Structures are given as C-alpha cells and as structure tokens.
Image (cartoon, grey):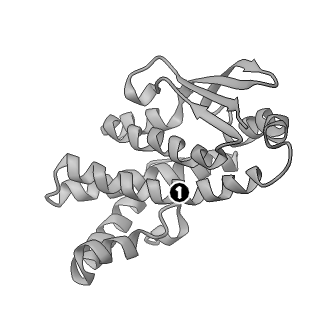
Amino acid sequence: MLILDYKETDLNFLYDDLSREYGKKQAELLYSLMCQKYTDLCKYEIRFENDEMNEHIFNRILPTIGVYITLIENGFTKEKALAVAHEEIQRNANYKAKENTKLTKMPFTYSLFKMFAKSHMKKKYPIEGFTVKWRRYDYKEIHFDIVRCIYKEMCEKYCCPELCTVFCQSDVTAFAGYKPKIRFERLGTIGEGANCCDFHFIRGK
C-alpha cells in the first residue's frame, strides 16, 4: 500500500511544525513514522459511502491518532504527545475560525446561520457517526445535543480516549470566529465525561 501523506489531511502543516520545533533531522524521522502509522491505521478502517464520514475519519481522526501514538511510541510522554496533537488541531481550528468570521461581515448573520444550520448538520454530521438531538431553534438561540460521536468512538477504539478532548476543544476555537454576531456556549462534552455535547449558538449583537 502506498504510504499516505499528511499533506492531504487536515494536518497538512504538520511537517513544517515538526521542523520548527525539533529541527529538520528529527522532524523527518518523526514525520516518516507518523505517515507510516497513519497508513497502517487506515488499513483497519472501511471507507463509507458517505464522503463526509470519510472526511471525519481519514482526514481528521486517524491522522491525529497517528501523530499521538507515534510520539508516545518514540519516547514522548502522554502529556507532551497530547500537547502536540492539541497544537496541530488548534492550527486547523484557527483556520476555520477565520473562515467563520466571513459570515459576520454579512447582514443578518444569525438569520443566515439559522437558515442553514439543520441542513449543514445533516450533511456534515451524518447519522452514520453522530446522533443529534435538536432542543431549541428560534430567533434567539440554536441548541442541539450530540449524544453519539464518532470521534469518541474512534479514540476509544484505538485506546486513546483522552485524545478526544483535543477535538472537543477545537470547536470552541473555530466557533469563536462568529463573535460578536453569534456566541457559542457549551457546558460539557462526551469526550470529557458529560452525557452529551451541548451546542448553544446564541444570537449576539
């Protein structure tokens, strides 16, 4: 099987970050091992007919698990490996935040957000990997709970449940791009031990 490259994933800046942090020689070694680990992980997963599920699993979850496991297998503590994974996912989340900011430049930001919220969730978070319960959907607030999440399931499958929190935290960063027009709040996540991930998008100024 062809060795997969992180440049085709959500962590497409990984090699540059490793080079900056650890120097070219160590970065090349770690990156090569991470690509091999990512490739090996993909061998165990069957692709879905749903492209969005494949995006979650093969472009986001497995690459991050590959980074985390590779670092631990090469002498990094779990805490350090988690910090590196967190930094990489945050890089991607910051990019998404900038993209989300574009919506705030348009009039009627909240109304536009609300108009497409349900169709967006249905498309991007399909039932194959997520169970979404809608709680509130009006002119003041959009609230839904995710009670089943493929991110949690995949992290548990590969014996790294603690890694799920990295993905949870990226939501906060990405959705901050909607401020001040839309404020995001959340009390807890499944990955952090709560019964659900409660998403609240509250109309702002």
Vertical arrangement, residue 12 with respect to residue 148, above or below: below
Q: Residue at x 77, y 36 (%)?
A: 117
Q: Nearer the viewer, residue 77 or 110?
A: 110
Residue 15 occupies quadrant: bottom left
Q: Residue at x 34, y 58 (%)?
A: 67
| Residue displayed at 67% across by 52% down | 100
| In-image side of 78 versus 38 (left or right) | left
Task: Please indicate, yes or no, whether residue 1 appears anywhere in the rendered image.
Answer: no
Tell me what residue is drawn at x 29 percent, y 68 percent.
33
The kind of residue tagged 1 is Asn
Q: Residues within 10 Å of mark 1 (few under 14, many from 20)?
A: some
- How far across and how far down the image is residue 99, in percent? 67, 58
Q: Is residue 145 above or below residue 180?
A: above
Q: Quadrant of the C terminus?
A: top right
Instruction: Please tell me whether mark 1 sits on a helix, a strand or a loop.
Output: helix
Question: In the rendered view, does 24 fall on the left or right side of 178?
Answer: left
Is 34 on the left or on the right of 125, as rendered? left
Is residue 76 something one can see in this rendering?
Answer: yes
- Number of numbered discs present? 1
Indicate the position of residue 28 as horizontal and vertical percent values.
29, 79
Quarter containing the N terminus: bottom left
| Residue assigned mark 1 | 94
Q: Position of residue 85 (x, y in %)?
A: 35, 54
**Above/below status of 190 relative to 85:** above
Measured from the top left, where is residue 188 in percent x and y? 46, 24
